[in-house]
Amino acid sequence: MAYNMKEIIATKPARFTAGHRMCAGCGAPVVGRTVLRALKNEDYAVISCATGCMEVSTFIYPYTSWTDSFIHTAFECAAANTSGVEAAYKSLKKQGKLPEDQHTKFITFGGDGGTYDIGLQSLSGAMERGHDMVYVCYDNGAYMNTGIQRSSATPRFADTTTSPAGKVIPGKMQNRKDLTQIMAGHHLPYVAQSIAVNNFKDLYEKSEKAIYTEGPAFLNVLAPCPRGWGYPTDMLMEINKLAVETCYWPLYEIVDGKYHITYKPANKKPIEEFLKPQRRFKHMFLPGNEWMIEEFQKEVDRRWQELLDLEEITNKE
Amino acid sequence: MGIRERLSGNEAAAIAMKQINPDVVAAFPITPSTEIPQYFSTFVSNGQVDTEFVAVESEHSAMTACIGAEAAGARAMTATSANGLSFMWEQIYIASSLRLPIVLSLVNRAVSGPLNIHNDHSDAMGVRDAGWIMLFSENNQEAYDNLLMAHRIAEHKDVLLPLMVCQDGFITSHSIENIELLEDDKAKAFVGTYKPEHYLLNKEEPIAIGPLDLQAHLFEHKYQQATAMRNAKKVIAEVSKEFEELTGRKYSFFEEYKLEDAEIAIVCMNSTAGTTKYVVDQLRNKGIKAGLLKIRMFRPFPTEEIAKALSHLKAVAVLDKADSLNGAGGALFEDVTSAMFVNKVQVPTVNYVYGIGGRDTTSNDIESVYNDLADIANKGGTNDFYRYLGVRK
């Protein structure tokens, strides 16, 4: 059936409800709501969340934005929490201690700090053990909850509070880690990279696949942050689009080892168009700093080509 | 009559877990507790338990997975030692704050550094304020018995706190001793089934746990934890009584060994109590009125009862198998002396830090403590109350 956003919204009530306290123009709640919409109405879910913006803005005692069961313990271990919940489900189900017709799905959310960095170990462990779960990283490219500190997901040259663009050092000096590729190295049944564009079609469809693929699945979703990136709050969807059109954030999935790029821009836009509206890259546009934009472009091109190659290699007969 | 067996402390713990048949076990190897998940995974592989065994990638994830499982509505257990417990530390606090009755078998070992794999109590002392019930075990039998009682205590509606059963690494964990086991059916009947009131997997009543809990509520939640810890005392007494009726083995908050008419006494925990009992017997043969108070229930701490039990003595030595490195003495010493102070018990009391990093504590060492106590009793006190036993200075 063709994707129809209006119909989906009309027939599937939001399981991530209004009233949360995330910022206007933030990408993360859009991700949360879209992922959960991909659940079948009759299915129940247990959500686990790492400490971060999403957790502290959606579950402030005694209020919660989550209509399904929800658990949070700490920053680095959302995947391990889900491991325990999923193991309990398997065990209780096997022993007949849960209703036979109850289908429960396990979805975990973590920001890039809680996923690329401090939570990488527990994520890797949970994925390797093969729990039937989906881990969703909402990647906003820095520790936004504590005030915009650099993470290993922060792009090169970005101005953050722990990689400030100064007189000697022009922002973060290292390229970003490619977590989606690290997850691909775990040889999971389903790995995908997505973003909220085009009426959320890409994200919805990949979420649905991730949730209904048996075994561990990983979704890496770019989730812009107006405070950390420095764009006007009404520009969220435009920024998302630019991330894709410039190939800064390629949309692709890996199903049983086969790469599939789900969107290839007809005319790949220059990276400046993505960088320009963002305050964190402002210094890159000062006279004399043209080399930064060139290097940034080179890295984007290199990674895009690598992805094209991987798609070709893995689909060879 | 139970089943006569010969088992190591780790085997005893694993057998107890087999009889408990928890829904989930998540564990990570660390000496000297490694054998517990090792034995247990054999039970899993051979279909002798219904448990899902989660072979996690770290102790942090072991405790986190136990939290997830217990919150989901399952009975979850784990085992660890030393640095493993240190690595769990963050989640140890979270487990108790979420009021999840997880049971942990702690095989006590020195916390690094430098690295040492042998026994002392520095791991347990590092979590003494974390809101866990802590039971100590002199030998394999006690480690087994305490584990069988653990869920009944932890899961009681007035308690709902996690519980750890401690035993000494290598000294009891790897020593084979005679033990009396309960028959499987009797053990299972005693432990009972877990029926949580609220749990994540209940589709009829979704819940959210682990909120951001700010100034308006955290204080009250901590008070509830404190209240639960106070309630645990009564429940531990009740469950121990019921266990005694079933097995004939009596467990109190602490064991008094020839203490009633003693003039001098040692207070200690775990295996050293065995050595101390031997020395007490020797001294009694010589007409010296020596006694022992062996603490089983360290958290909650039986303040009033301990003060009362020590009130008639002329001198007391508290043995700490971990130093608090505060320049003033070990944790048990501070707990015992403040218990005495608030209950107006004035007995000269001295602290010995001993057995660090697995240093043997011989009967001669213990005897030297009693000799010191006789001297302190004669003089009516000492200013030198913070001492080391068996260290080369």
Image (tube, coloured by chain):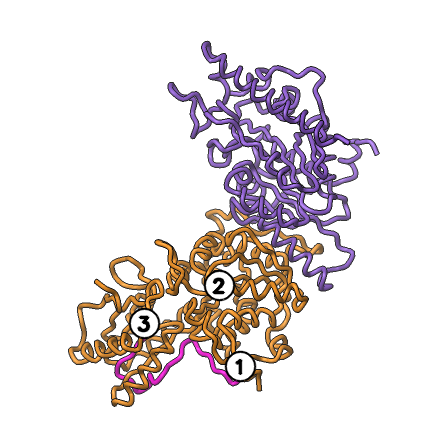
- Same chain for the residues under marks 1 and 3 in the image: yes
Instruction: Let me know if residue B326 is in the magenta part.
Output: no
Residue type at the position of mark 3: Thr
Position of residue A45 measured from the top left corner of the image (x, y, whole percent): 69, 48
Q: How many marks?
A: 3
Q: Which chain is orange?
A: B
Which residue position holds label 2? Answer: B33
Q: Is residue B251 magenta?
A: yes
The residue at 75%/52% (across/down) is A103
Q: Is residue B7 visible?
A: yes
Say if mark 1 contacts mark 3, CB within 8 Å: no
Q: Which mark is residue B180?
A: 1
- x and y percentages locating residue B161 in the rendered image: 51, 63
Distance of label 2 from label 3 (alpha carbons):
21 Å
Q: Earlier in the sequence, mark 2 or mark 1?
A: 2
Find residue B361 and name its label. Answer: 3
Q: Nearer the viewer, residue A304 or A20?
A: A304
Are the numbered discs 2 and 1 placed on the same chain, yes or no? yes
- The image quadrant that residue A181 belongs to is top right
